[in-house]
Amino acid sequence: MNKERSNLKEQLNKELNHLHFLGQQKVLNHIHNKSWKQRIKLFMNKEIELPILPVSTVFLLLFLSFATKSIILDDGLGRNKEKILIEAGGNVYWKEELLKVESKDEES
């Protein structure tokens, strides 16, 4: 059995003697402890896979919740207030803007 095994090994060595393993250093680098710089580089090079359907559903729900909140509640920007036009000096102004300008003139 040992003789048969050694014959097989010799035959294998003859067939594979033209092949040489050149990646020894690369394999050793992967096996041995890495420096902090290499660890950070490996960490930053990770691929992140996110499933499209759940992530897009979450973003859609968040968007809709904020949109409905701003539609239902007045967010203080005056979007739900009725705009009134005033004619002054031959020109037409929004009442709100005219009041702002007048208050600035009174302060000056």
Image (cartoon, helix red, strand yellow):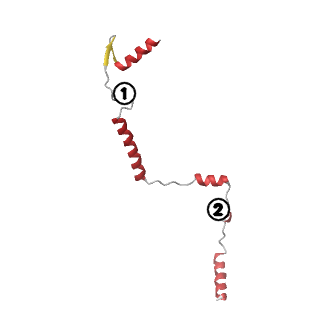
In percent of the image, x 66 and y 87: which residue is there? 2
Question: In the image, residue 73 lies at what x, y percent?
Answer: 35, 34
In which quarter of the view is residue 65 placed? Answer: top left
Compared to 63, does 44 lie above or below? below
In percent of the image, x 67 and y 58: which residue is there? 34
In percent of the image, x 33 and y 36: which residue is there? 72
Compared to 59, does 71 lie above or below? above
Number of other residues with Cα within 10 Å of mark 2, as a class: few under 14, some 14 to 19, many 20 or more = few
Mark toward the start of the polypeptide (2 vs 1) = 2
In which quarter of the view is residue 63 placed? Answer: top left
Question: In the image, residue 62 lies at what x, y percent?
Answer: 40, 44
* Kind of element beneath mark 1: loop
Compared to 83, does 8 lie above or below? below
In percent of the image, x 31 and y 19: which residue is there? 85
Q: Residue furthest top?
A: 89
Q: Where does label 2 land, which residue?
A: 30
Question: In the image, residue 107 lies at what x, y percent?
Answer: 46, 13
Q: Which mark is residue 69?
A: none
Quadrant of the drawing holding the N terminus: bottom right
Toward the viewer: 32 or 20? 32
Toward the viewer: 70 or 11? 70
Compared to 91, does 15 lie above or below? below
Toward the viewer: 5 or 107? 107
2 vs 1, front mark: 1
The amino acid at mark 2 is His
Q: Where does label 1 land, which residue?
A: 78
Q: How far apart are labels 2 and 1 at the CA level?
A: 62 Å
